Structure formats: structure tokens, C-alpha cells
Image (cartoon, rainbow, N blue to C red):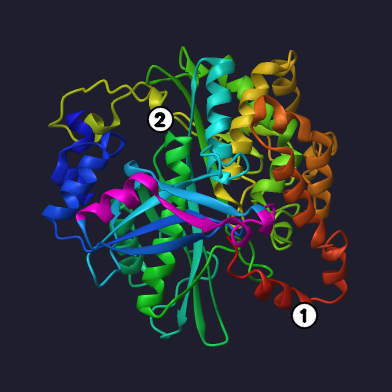
Amino acid sequence: MKHKIEMNPNKLVKFLQKAPEEFTKTDIISFIKEQDIQMINFMYPAGDGRLKTLNFVINSADYLITILSCGERVDGSSLFSFIEAGSSDLYAIPRFRTAFVDPFAQTPTLTMLCSFFNKDGEPLESSPEYTLHKACLAFTKITGMQFEAMGELEYYVIAPNDGLFPATDQHGYHESGPYDKFNQFRTQCMKYISQANGKIKYGHSEVGNFTQDGLTYEQNEIEFLPTKAEDAADQLMIAKWIIRNLASQYGYNITFAPKITAGKAGSGLHIHMRITKAGKNQMLENGVLSDTARKAIAGMMHLAPSITAFGNTTPTSYFRLVPNQEAPTNICWGDRNRSVLVRVLLGWSAKKDMCAMTNPLETISNNDTSNKQTVEMRSPDGSADIYLLMASLAVACRHGFEIKDALNITEKTYVNIDIHKEENKVRLQSLDQLPDSCAASADCLQQQRAIFEQHNVFSPSMIDGVICKLKAYNDGELRKELLINPAKMREVVETYFHCG
């Protein structure tokens, strides 16, 4: 356990000398007293995908124990559209493992994410966070393994154009300063996210950059490390909250929107997944992709049309998912192929010590790199309800173990070519397509909803609510309308600019 504590930037981990999953109520109280914490924030995701906050001032030891033990009542009907006002009281109960010191509060404040419970003291079946919990439990029950995930959080930073060292349009990938304008901002975000339990892999500038109306638009990305899917979702939620708050302090604007203008790179929320057993990655067998991984991919191939209902939730999502661009539109998978829906990333399977080759003074280390292997779902974007998206992917991967012809599905949907090249036109035409609108996505979810409702993972009322929301956009013909009236795209983009 020492390796989880050493060099961990979370102030509670440093003080308690415990990993977050070991935090207890006694630990939280001890930290609050010793560090002179004066306030507590409860935070929880609502139906709009954003975190909400409830503030407490600590006025006595008894009161502190009460709020940590009992949580507080909140109005569920104001948080979720599927809860009626006549029976709307919910309890928000803090999850101690999520505790972190608020980096923005002027008064020393400890923040924790919460879970929802109903009037009978039972977990709220339709809450996004509990839906993900049920999805992970069902995955483990069926497979005997654990579902893990992490996200690539892409976003645009927007600020007045200073005219200095302009980056090359749409060539900002891994740019360095001074052409990378927001490196300092990004690294400060990464510092705060890591202090709030975020396990970050790296950060960098992305492809997209342009100037418009006197403003600089620069695309950035912060990518995380794989962990339990429930923790991965928590980390992404907190990360979005931190990025927006720090941007506000810098005077920047931020958008996670999937598409903000025509002809420029859109922003995705790619999700990487791996399946583990007793801490060992099961995605490889003898150095090649395992049947375990192939079954999970088969489940994602089968449910891909309806996964968009959770991962692509505004009309602008489908401005990004258009043919002949890097975002996928075809239901297929492949190795190291960015034109596919599910990508098997380049691994470290060469069994060569590249570090020793680069640094002659180093001895051969023979590091086990098998845990690095993941597969990547490339369709989701920043409009997603992160908990429901993760839950839908856990359901899809579990489903791959429940269907008899899983490996046959995997074989039929595999491609090792660029399907957008003219010479591969026949293969492209043989592939099924993702939905092209929220309305079409809702229809796909309706057709496949029984699979999501199996094992009591997604409640029927949750599925009904998602379908109703998607259909309300009435966007079935929107992409065709914009071909006739391009000016309308800006209006639509502005409407959903701050999604998720």
C-alpha cells in the first residue's frame, strides 16, 4: 500500500498516510480538526450532468459528526426530471474516499462527492452514480472480473488573441510554448485535479486551434490512468469542475462541446477500458488480444447505436460524428486505426527495453507492460452524462460475455484498413452506421433498452427519461437543414456551448 501513498498530492493522503479508499469518518474528523478546516461542501451530479454544491459551516463537533453520518435532505425534483415534486426528498450522503481540500475556497474547505438515497434509506435506483455502481456489480457477477476505465478529457480554451507566436491552424498537437498559449493554465488544472484524487496520465495541447472574432481558440487534453470505473467517473466530474473554476479565475472561457465551428477539430471524450482479475490485466494473452477483450468489443459493437444515447446527448454531438473525419461513424474496430469506433491501441508488446536502448547506463529492467493494454471507445463527447456513459460501456462489455456468437461478431466487424479511402468503399458500405441525431439515438436505445435494464442496472424510468430528452430536441433533419442554412449552426452551437 505504500506505493499508493508515497508522493500522492492529496493533502488528506499525506496527513493520514492512507489511500483514499481507506478513509473513515474518524479520519475525516481528525483531518478537519488538525488542519483547521472550517467548512464542508457536498457535491453531487444532477440530471444536467454538472456537479451541484451544498455548503456547510462547521459550528460544533456534534454538528460535524451529524452531517458526516446522516448527510442532508435535498430536493430531488430540482435535480432530476424523473422525480416528481410530491415525493422528491432525497438524502445526500458523503463518500469519504472522494474527500479533497477545495483549491478555490477562501475559507479552508473540505469537499466530498455524495450518493443519493430515497425516503426508505435505500440507494436511489435511478441516480447516475448508483446506476454505474450496479453496472459494475453486474459485470463482476457475470464475468468474475472487474471493469476499469479512464477518460481523455478534451476541451477548448478561449481567450483574447494577443497576436504573438500564432500556432499553425489545426496543427496544435503536442505544441510547446510560446505557440501553446495555455500550457500554464493546463498544468495548474492538472495540479489541482491530482490534489483532488485525479490519477492523471498526462496533459497536452491538441490538434484544434484557430482565431475568430479577435479570440484565440486552443484545444487541450488531459488524459487519466485506468482505475475502477466508478472512481474514473468521479475523477472526470471533478476535473471538469476544476477546469471551469480555474478558467473563471484566469478570465478564460472553456467549452467541452463536441463541435463549435465547421471545419475545425471537434472535442471528444474517448473512454479507455480494461478488464482485470486479481489486479492482472486480462486484455492480452500470450502477447496478443485475448478472447476476453474480443468478447467485450463484441458487446460494444452490438450496443454501439444505443451507447450514443448516453455519450452523445446534444444535437451538436452529431456535427462531430460525420463521415470522412477522425471521429467515427461506422460500427467497427481495429488495431491502432483512428478511423474505427473501438481502437486497440499500440501496446508495449515488442518485449524490448527501449529505456535501456536510449540510456546506455541503464540495465535491462524487464518491466511488465501488459497492464498498459486498453481498448478505446471513440464516439463519446463532453455532452455525456459521465456516470451513465460509463455504465452503458460496462453493460456493453458484460453483454459481450452473454451472447453466444460474440467472437463471430468481433471477427465480422474488424477492419485493418482506412475505411474512408476510395479503394475500401465496398468494405465501408458493409458496416453498420452510428445514429446521425439525438432522435435516431433515442430510437436505437428504445430498441435495445432491455439489455440495459437486465440485472436491474438501468431502471425503466431512467431509460424513459433519456429517450424523452433526446426526442425533445427534434433534430432528425437538423444536419440537412444546416446544409441549406449554415448560419444556423452558430446558433445551435451557442445553445449547447456549455454542455455537460
Q: Which residues are magenta?
A: 61-86
Q: Nearer the viewer, residue 352 or 65?
A: 65
Number of marks in picture: 2
Task: Give the quarter of the image for residue 199.
Answer: top left
User: What residue would you read off at disc 1?
Assistant: 487
Task: Give the quarter of the image for residue 499.
Answer: bottom right
**Dot 1, how many residues are within 10 Å of its Cα: few (below 14), some (14-19), or many (20+)?**
few
Asked if residue 419 shows in the view, the reply is no
Asked if residue 54 shows in the view, the reply is yes
SS at circle 2: helix
Q: Nearer the viewer, residue 101 or 427?
A: 101
Q: Is 129 in the magenta? A: no
**Dot 2, how many residues are within 10 Å of its Cα: few (below 14), some (14-19), or many (20+)?**
some
| Horizontal and vertical percent position of residue 384 | 61, 52
Q: Amino acid at mark 2?
A: Lys
Quarter of the image for the N terminus: give it. Answer: top left
| Horizontal and vertical percent position of residue 169 | 54, 70
Q: Nearer the viewer, residue 358 or 376?
A: 376
Q: Nearer the viewer, residue 319 or 129?
A: 129
Q: Amino acid at mark 1?
A: Ala
Quarter of the image for the C terminus: give it. Answer: bottom right
Task: Give the quarter of the image for residue 338.
Answer: top right
Residue drawn at point x = 87 percent, y = 65 percent: 480
User: Against 149, is 385 above or below?
Assistant: below
User: Against 64, is 243 above or below?
Assistant: below
Residue drawn at point x = 74 percent, y = 73 percent: 489
| Horizontal and vertical percent position of residue 400 | 66, 22
Of pointers 1 and 2, the one earlier in the residue sequence: 2
Whether label 1 touches label 2, CB < 8 Å: no
User: Against 273, is 242 above or below?
Assistant: below
Q: CA distance from mark 1 to mark 2?
A: 45 Å
User: What residue would you read off at disc 2?
Assistant: 372
